[in-house]
């Protein structure tokens, strides 16, 4: 510790610093915290916020691609739904939240951005444990767009391992409230790394496949798509794949997927705002199909990215220097 | 928003502030964050810390009573156990962590304090999603001692309601890793408030009683104590009650407790570092026993507080002005 020490009584006591230097590096970006636009390195919350101490928070993550938000309305629907279910309130309506998200991206200058909107339970001055006494806290941040799969993985397909960890069940936490309860997913990730895989899928309470850290999963078999229907986040990219199936005339179903069904699929892909539609070509060390990125997956990926320019599904961000 | 606005292009753009004013009130206290002792109002973490964004963190809470830490060793055992299970590391050994906790309390001046020691996954400069690339973050804070039950509730007994929400099961998150996954408990609290109760108990996956928000529960029947043995945090106060049973010659068991067993108990109490041993006299609107605080509960409460002066179970805090 580098703080000044003063001898008081029998021992040396450090000063109490008025500010804490944070020497960590953060990605470039802009945040809106406690009513103020600031740089991402200054975007901090009190350690006493129940959003941290109890993970009592909901959020949503939208993305900007080529200077356009993608399906922001769907993200706002889910975010405001989560607020209501958690009995939180914010002093902004949908239009104002969208405006703050747009402003963060505009100020950041990022043409491709990952934009998170967050509401935490907040805190009460007395540190009361009664959540009804807390003043909720609202935040937004915009950082460069990130992906679950890197460029190489997008080209050759991800290597995934299935962990026996069970996703926190709906009887405990409603998965339609997008939340930060990830210790099951993080444990799944470490299990996957130990098996030489790049990311993980974990199970539902029946032992079927649920989801991975930040993504849903799809199988393709005989031209038909399936994705788990239980114990998963209703992902916006998952919904977008349903919509693309409608456009392309593919049949799809939300249904139980066993490990055997997954391994026997013609194609597997995952979906996330962080990366979109991403191919999986190996599960538990076994090749999926012929081991190459599948043609249905490729077709859906293409339409997914093409639709980012479509005015029905995207809206332009204004930048200060444009 | 009160930030300065500047016209750039077609619209007004706010400045990007270098610091964010936080006008909230916090309890008085001292924290140790990023290697610096500071006031509690300055104790903040980056919103990009995975300890916030993924609740990827472990912690422990010890308390100081009459200027003495109570059973700090047991809390340090559990904290270091959690670090290992989550594959986190900190640059301090047990003795150094204890020293930092002592210093926070000493600097705070609190003779009765609630002291939390925390390790988060931290963050990586690239905002990588791979937890192995994150630099873990260590924190301690000391605030005034708080209790689940207030003075009146301690005297007449708490009114508790049992929710049907299921505690996040051990197959999802190992409950021996003390963690911030509380959305199930918070939902249970709101359920309890709706039933006119003051706090909640939630269930295990078999429908038996698990635990409440920050506490374990005990029943007393025919002089014998029981507490749930599955899907619960192995609480230090729970362990202390076991030890007190040894001292007083009470029989105790960790075993499944159904709602019927709970309602039919002679006495019920809860245990937490935040308040110690606290009587429950009403469950789901029904009186427990004769509706008064039970004699076994009172005896255990008395020994619990008496032992706070015992040198085997407590250690004195040094204060700057002592």
Image (spheres, coloured by chain):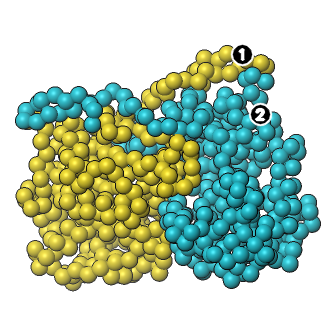
Chain colours: A yellow, B cyan
Picture disc at residue B4: none
Q: Position of residue A252 (x, y in %)?
A: 22, 80
Residue at 78% x, 76% y is B289
Quadrant placement of the N terminus of chain A: top right
What chain does mark 2 sit on? Answer: B
Residue at 45% x, 30% y is A22
| Res. A305 in view | yes
In the picture, measured across the screen, residue B119 lies left or right of residue B154, that is left
Residue at 60% x, 61% y is B213
Give the number of marks.
2
Q: A291 and A233: which one is in front?
A: A233
Q: Position of residue B220 (x, y in %)?
A: 80, 73
Q: Position of residue B120 (x, y in %)?
A: 52, 46
What chain does mark 1 sit on? Answer: A
In the picture, measured across the screen, residue B98 lies left or right of residue B19, that is right
Position of residue B99 relative to residue A6, above or below, is: below
Distance from label 2 to label 1 (Cα)?
A: 16 Å
The answer to which quarter of the image holds residue A217 is bottom left
| Res. A150 in view | no
In the picture, measured across the screen, residue A202 lies left or right of residue A254, that is right
Q: A65 and A287: which one is in front?
A: A65
In the picture, measured across the screen, residue A243 lies left or right of residue B184, that is left
Picture disc at residue B317: 2
Q: A282 and A169: which one is in front?
A: A169
Mark 2 touching mark 1, by CB under 8 A? no
Q: Secondary structure beneath disc 2?
A: loop
Picture disc at residue A7: 1
Residue at 83% x, 54% y is B304
The answer to which quarter of the image holds residue A259 is bottom left
Position of residue B159 relative to residue A186, above or below, is: below
Q: Position of residue B322 (x, y in %)?
A: 79, 24
């Amino acid at each position: 510790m580098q703080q000044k020490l003063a001898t008081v009584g029998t021992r040396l006591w450090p000063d109490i610093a008025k500010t804490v230097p944070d020497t960590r590096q953060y990605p470039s970006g802009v945040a809106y915290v406690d009513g103020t636009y600031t740089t991402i390195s200054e975007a901090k919350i009190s350690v006493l916020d129940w959003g941290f101490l109890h993970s009592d928070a909901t959020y949503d993550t939208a993305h900007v691609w080529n200077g356009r938000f993608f399906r922001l309305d769907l993200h706002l629907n889910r975010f405001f739904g989560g607020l209501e279910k958690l009995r939180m309130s914010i002093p902004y309506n949908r239009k104002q939240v969208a405006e703050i998200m747009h402003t963060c991206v505009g100020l950041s200058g990022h043409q491709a951005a990952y934009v998170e909107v967050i509401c935490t339970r907040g805190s009460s001055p007395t540190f009361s444990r009664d959540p009804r006494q807390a003043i909720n806290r609202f935040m937004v941040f915009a950082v460069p767009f990130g992906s679950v799969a890197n460029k190489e993985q997008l080209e050759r397909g991800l290597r995934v391992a299935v962990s026996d960890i069970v996703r926190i069940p709906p009887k405990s936490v409603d998965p339609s409230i997008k939340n930060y309860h990830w210790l099951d997913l993080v444990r799944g990730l470490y299990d996957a790394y130990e098996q030489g895989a790049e990311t993980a899928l974990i199970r539902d309470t029946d032992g079927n496949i649920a989801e991975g850290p930040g993504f849903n999963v799809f199988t393709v078999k005989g031209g038909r798509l399936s994705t788990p229907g239980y114990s998963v986040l209703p992902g916006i990219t998952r919904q977008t794949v349903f919509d693309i199936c409608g456009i392309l005339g593919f049949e799809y179903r939300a249904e139980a997927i066993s490990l055997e069904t997954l391994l026997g699929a013609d194609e597997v892909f995952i979906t996330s705002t962080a990366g979109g539609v991403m191919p999986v070509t190996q599960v538990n060390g076994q090749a999926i199909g012929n081991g190459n990125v599948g043609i249905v997956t490729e077709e859906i990926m293409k339409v997914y990215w093409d639709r980012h320019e479509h005015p029905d599904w995207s809206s332009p961000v204004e930048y200060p220097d444009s």
